[in-house]
């Protein structure tokens, strides 16, 4: 292949499959490779701060190739009735409370508005850039579906009646915050 090589650093198979589907759909001159690597979940006040810090940590342990793109993605669920919680702490909150714990926190709330945000941090030839994607939606009253991961069983994107966990990859990619951030990154890569 004579195209551009993008190396996606993640241990999450579901994330990789979502991004792979998008890259294949978008452009055959891009080759997505999986750097299957578990890295420490950094904490910070913003997704961009976490993504940039995590990418810097990972890159210091990898030997990078010139003219290849290396990226990772961090996402968070921001719930209006909880003042944006869990936000940048979503991974930790999911590991400790799960989506069931989030539903418990919302048991008496009528306002179910929420949004998923995704930030891709990409490294190319000594420079790091970030790209952000957002999808608005609402928190369901119960978990539904067996697809996806994380908070997918309780998030219904605007314009849909199903949770992310009830959707296959193609359906989810029509709404996904991750698709939005990765699409912006791909646009930039295609123009560099």
Image (cartoon, helix red, strand yellow):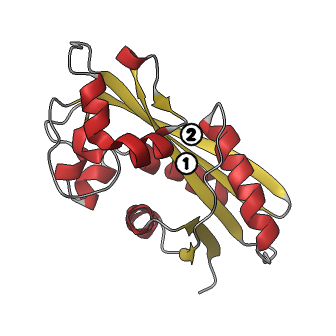
Q: Is residue 90 above or below residue 67?
A: above
Which residue is labeled 2 in the image? 132
Q: Is residue 135 above or below residue 9?
A: above
Tell me: 50 left or right of 20.
Answer: right
For image coordinates 59% across by 72% down, the residue present is 37
Q: Residue furthest bottom?
A: 1
Depth-wise, is mark 1 or mark 2 nearer the camera? Answer: 1
For image coordinates 13% across by 36% down, the residue present is 161
Query: x and y percent of residue 113 in the render?
Result: 31, 20
Tell me: 176 left or right of 192.
Answer: left
Query: x and y percent of residue 149 in the render?
Result: 32, 55
Label 2 sits on a secondary structure element that is: strand
Which one is nearer the viewer's eye here, 105 or 143? 105
Residue 10 lies in quadrant? bottom right
For image coordinates 23% across by 53% down, the residue present is 171
Q: CA distance from mark 1 to mark 2?
A: 10 Å
For image coordinates 55% across by 36% down, the residue present is 88
Which residue is labeled 1 in the image? 74
Q: Residue furthest front?
A: 96
Residue 21 in view of the camera:
yes
Could you classify mark 2 by the number of other residues whose Cα lies within 10 Å: few (under 14), some (14-19), or many (20 or more)?
Answer: many
Of mark 1 and mark 2, the one earlier in the sequence is 1
Tell me: 145 left or right of 70.
Answer: left
Residue 192 in view of the camera:
no
Q: Is residue 77 above or below residue 82?
A: below
Task: Name the quarter where the C terminus is drawn.
Answer: bottom right
Residue 143 lies in quadrant? top left
């Amino acid at each position: 292949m004579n195209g551009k090589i993008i190396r996606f650093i993640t241990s999450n198979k579901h994330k990789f499959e979502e991004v792979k589907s998008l890259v294949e759909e978008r452009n055959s001159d891009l080759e997505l490779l999986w750097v299957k690597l578990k890295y420490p979940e950094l904490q910070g006040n913003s997704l961009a701060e976490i993504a940039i810090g995590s990418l810097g940590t990972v890159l210091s342990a990898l030997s990078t190739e010139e003219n290849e793109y290396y990226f990772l993605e961090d996402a968070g669920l921001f719930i209006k009735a909880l003042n944006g919680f869990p936000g940048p702490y979503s991974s930790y909150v999911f590991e400790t409370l799960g989506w069931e714990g989030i539903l418990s926190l919302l048991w008496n709330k009528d306002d179910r508005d929420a949004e998923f945000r995704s930030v891709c941090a990409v490294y190319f030839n000594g420079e790091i850039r970030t790209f952000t994607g957002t999808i608005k939606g609402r928190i369901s009253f119960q978990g539904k579906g067996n697809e996806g991961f994380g908070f997918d069983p309780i998030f219904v994107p605007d314009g849909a009646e199903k949770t992310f966990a009830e959707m296959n990859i193609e359906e989810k990619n029509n709404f996904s915050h991750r698709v939005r951030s990765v699409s912006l990154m791909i646009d930039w890569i295609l123009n560099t």
